[in-house]
Image (cartoon, rainbow, N blue to C red):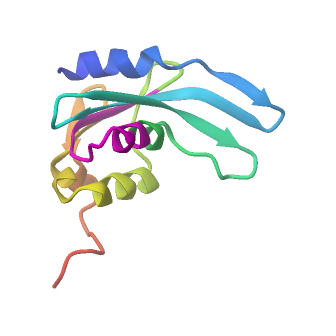
């Protein structure tokens, strides 16, 4: 799958809306392609109490629920179509799911793709 196709998958799940006075969802969509060739998507959940989660977390949870953990490619897209790099929490979350995820290709902007390892150059898990 190309990043253009992954972009379309992530964009397709975006549907910003308020669930309550303190919860907004769906402003960011994410798509993950696994090493097995499956696609998982998710949206963000933003809560006033800060216990929500990013779209990448939602997509990764769907992937884990389906029994997979090795990610080949991933992308996150804002409601306005802008590509977003994963936050630090998402970077670490994805990296810990499978040791091979350091090689995950992450689209961080319209014209830039980097490995997850490049986004986490100084891992606390590396033995010295």
**Along the horizontal axis of the image, is 49 left or right of 73?**
right
Quarter of the image for residue 105 reads top left
Let me know if residue 7 is in the magenta part: no
Against 118, residue 124 (above or below) is below
Let me know if residue 68 is in the magenta part: yes
**Numbered label tally:** 0
Q: Which is nearer the eye, 30 or 115?
A: 30
Against 18, residue 90 (above or below) is below
Q: Which residue is at 28% across, 53% downward? A: 119
Horizontal and vertical percent position of residue 120:
28, 59
Quadrant into which the C terminus falls: bottom left
Q: Which residues are magenta?
A: 60-77
Quadrant into which the N terminus falls: top left
Quarter of the image for residue 98 reads bottom left
Horizontal and vertical percent position of residue 18:
74, 26
Horizontal and vertical percent position of residue 21:
84, 33
Horizontal and vertical percent position of residue 59:
41, 36
Residue found at the far right of this picture: 21
Q: Which residue is at 33% across, 51% downward? A: 94
Against 30, residue 12 (above or below) is above
Q: Which residue is at 70% across, 43% downward? A: 47
């Amino acid at each position: 799958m190309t990043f253009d196709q992954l972009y379309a998958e992530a964009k397709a799940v975006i549907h910003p809306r308020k669930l309550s006075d303190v919860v907004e969802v769906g402003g960011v969509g994410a798509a993950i392609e696994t090493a097995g060739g499956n696609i998982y998507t998710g949206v963000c959940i933003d809560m006033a109490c800060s216990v929500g989660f990013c779209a990448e977390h939602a997509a990764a949870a769907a992937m884990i629920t389906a029994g997979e953990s090795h990610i080949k490619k991933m992308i996150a897209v804002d409601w306005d179509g802008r590509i977003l790099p994963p936050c630090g929490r998402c970077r670490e979350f994805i990296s810990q799911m499978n040791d091979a995820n350091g090689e995950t290709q992450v689209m961080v902007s319209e014209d830039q793709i980097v490995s997850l390892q490049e986004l986490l150059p100084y891992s606390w898990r590396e033995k010295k």
